[in-house]
Amino acid sequence: MSKKHSQREQVASPPSNSALATVTQQSLSFSGPLPPPGVLAKYNEVIPNGAERIVAMAERQSAHRESLEAQVVAGNVASQKRGSIFAFIICLVALIGGFALLFTGRNADGLAAIISSLTALAGVFVYGRYKQGKERVDKADALATRRQN
């Protein structure tokens, strides 16, 4: 939570009879789930248990957000695991099929099946590593930009 507090005084030019007028302007702003303690305490004056209700609302919202994030992470892990298992099965079937073709005398077809499945597997691996590296660089750049601001 960040708070901004500013106070500005403006002095008007004195009129001819030497009277001096001072104008004070004050502003308060904050960001985050909870207002500053002084403002929060004033809610109790207006609404019975107002501050307690606001804090409880912020706690519920935080727990909800954490729950959603945990579900997203668990879903991504499960999806990646399923993808790896299915890729392994497809590659294994292609390799077995290639060896079966080799044993039945179709050497060119068997070698093509084996080589193409291994090439596809290597390509997916290399592309995945490339994407991971690019994401890391993008995240590092975004973090550096945020720190500069």
Image (cartoon, helix red, strand yellow):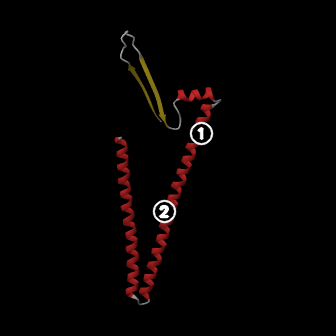
Q: Determine the residue located farthest toward the top in the rendered image.
A: 17
**Crowd around label 1: few <14 · some 14–19 · many ≥20 (10 Å):** some
Number of dots carrying numbers: 2
SS at badge 2: helix
**What residue is rendered at 43% in x and 87% in y?**
103
Residue 90 in picture, x, y percent from top left: 47, 74
**What residue is rendered at 40% in x and 85% in y?**
109
**What residue is rendered at 58% in x and 27% in y?**
42
Please give the label number shown on residue 57: 1
Distance, label 2 to label 1, CA atoms, is 35 Å
**Left or right, residue 137 beside residue 64:** left
Q: Is residue 71 above or below residue 82?
A: above
**Left or right, residue 80 beside residue 141:** right
Query: Could you tell me the amino acid type at mark 1?
Result: Met
Image quarter of residue 24:
top left
In the image, 36 versus 10, the foreground residue is: 10
Q: Determine the residue located farthest toward the front in the rendered image.
A: 16
Residue 59 in picture, x, y percent from top left: 57, 40
Query: Could you tell me the amino acid type at mark 2?
Result: Gln
Please give the label number shown on residue 95: none
Which part of the image, by quadrant, shows the C terminus? top left
* Tag 2 residue: 80
SS at badge 1: helix
Q: Determine the residue located farthest toward the bottom in the rendered image.
A: 105
In the image, 102 versus 74, the foreground residue is: 74
Image quarter of residue 55:
top right
